[in-house]
Image: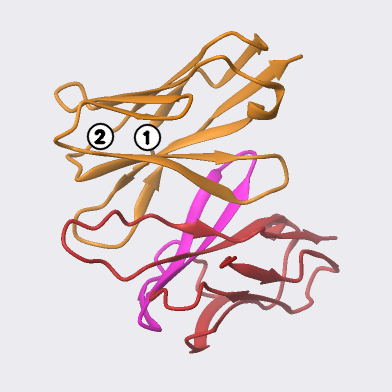
Chain colours: A red, B orange
Amino acid sequence: DARVTQTPRHKVTEMGQEVTMRCQPILGHNTVFWYRQTMMQGLELLAYFRNRAPLDDSGMPKDRFSAEMPDATLATLKIQPSEPRDSAVYFCASGAPESGRASKTQYFGPGTRLLVL
Amino acid sequence: SQQGEEDPQALSIQEGENATMNCSYKTSINNLQWYRQNSGRGLVHLILIRSNEREKHSGRLRVTLDTSKKSSSLLITASRAADTASYFCATDDDNTDKLIFGTGTRLQVFP
């Protein structure tokens, strides 16, 4: 049963601390997306990768957020230093390689619920 | 914002009734997808309709697409309490891998 996994599922931290969230995409998928979801802003795309290369991180606050894919099985999203306004649910999603008129369907992980005090 | 608009924002119905949700989008598309999100969970893909299709069915789901009006609707027939969730439409950005998600409709189905 292939699925996207994310760790940790929950994180409570204090303002100023570093937070690292991890994602394992579905094996064979070549696109990875990081989203943030809040009640006020809805679902926001933070960054995405294709074949491990970052293609778009325009939605990400550059001064404190960073996203990487050290290898094809791991994507990370780091916040340093964290702030209370970063409190949200962070989702990772992956997509299969496209062929022809691709569907671009995304498969979401369960999310990391972050609370910054 | 590039987000699509969904209507209504919230919908409450009784089990057995049909639920209809609408989505409007702004740019030309290749495909439109619908996703469901249960409380505290990630989004799950439900159904995809291509720009040259007008209607598609999957079980109790019926999706229509009107590209001239840039709108789509999702109909859930004979709803069940387990259908309680938020539903999002998503359109593709032709030049990238990105999806543009709508703001979502929160559906509550009462037993």
Which chain does the numbered disc 2 sit on?
B
Residue A45 is covered by the magenta coloring: yes
> Pointer 1: what residue?
B4
Report the side of B4 relative to A38 (left or right).
Answer: left
Q: Are marks 2 and 1 in contact (CB under 8 Å)?
A: yes
Q: Please state the horizontal and vertical placement of residue A69, each as a whole percent of the image.
A: 50, 85
> Can you tell which mark lies on residue B26?
2
Residues drawn in magenta: A31-59
- In the picture shown, does residue B62 fall above or below B29? above
Residue B33 is covered by the magenta coloring: no
Looking at the rendering, in which quadrant would you find the N terminus of chain A?
bottom right
- In the picture shown, does residue A95 fall above or below A80? above
Q: Please state the horizontal and vertical placement of residue B49, each as a whole percent of the image.
A: 28, 37
Q: Say which of A55 and B73 sits in front.
A: B73
| Residue kind at label 2, given as amino acid type | Lys
Residue at the location (85% across, 69% down)?
A: A14
Q: Say which of B101 and B42 sits in front.
A: B42
| Residue kind at label 1, given as amino acid type | Gly
> Can you tell which mark lies on residue B81?
none
Report the side of B28 relative to A9 (left or right).
Answer: left
Say which quarter of the image contains residue A83.
bottom right
Report the side of B31 relative to B76 (left or right).
Answer: left
Q: Please state the horizontal and vertical placement of residue B46, each as a whole percent of the image.
A: 46, 40
Residue at the location (56% across, 14% down)?
A: B78
Q: Please state the horizontal and vertical placement of residue A38, each as a whole percent of the image.
A: 64, 46
